[in-house]
């Protein structure tokens, strides 16, 4: 697998809430919630993901045991 991410995930994982700079994030005040609209999805969405046949064969070779 080619991992092209240059993100330092160890640093991200070590951050606490106090260490994260949220100074540019606007507060959600009453005017925000007065305009907010609750929307529920109208139906299911079909997602199709192409899988390489060799990869599919590898997963199938792992068996169908379900972990508890």
Image (spheres, rainbow, N blue to C red):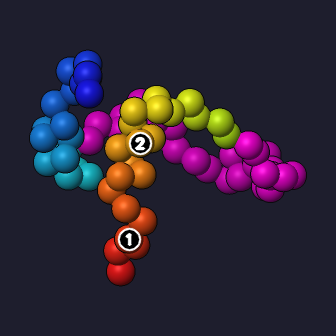
**Depth check, front residue: 3 or 35:** 3
Q: Position of residue 53 (x, y in %)?
A: 47, 32
Secondary structure found at label 2? helix
Residue 39 in sight here: no
Q: Which residue is mark 1?
A: 65
The image's mark for residue 11 is none
Q: Quadrant of residue 47?
A: top right
Is residue 33 inside the magenta stretch? Answer: yes
Q: Position of residue 18 (x, y in %)?
A: 22, 50
Frontmost of labels 2 and 1 is 2
Q: Which residue is mark 2?
A: 57
Q: What type of secondary structure mainly makes up the magenta span?
A: loop
Ranked by sequence position, the earlier of labels 2 and 1 is 2
What is the C-alpha distance between the residues marked 2 and 1? 16 Å
Residue 7 in sight here: yes
Q: Quadrant of residue 24?
A: top left
Q: Position of residue 30 (x, y in %)?
A: 68, 53
25 to the left or right of 11: right
Instruction: Name the residue: 26% across, 27% down.
Output: 1
Above or below, 11 against 43 in this view is above
**Depth check, front residue: 20 or 12:** 12
Part of the protein shown in magenta: 20-46
């Amino acid at each position: 697998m080619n991992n092209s991410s240059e993100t330092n995930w160890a640093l991200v994982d070590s951050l606490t809430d106090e260490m994260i700079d949220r100074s540019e994030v606007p507060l959600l005040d009453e005017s925000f919630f007065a305009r907010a609209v609750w929307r529920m999805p109208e139906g299911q969405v079909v997602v199709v993901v192409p899988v390489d046949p060799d990869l599919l064969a590898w997963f199938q070779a792992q068996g169908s045991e379900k972990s508890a």
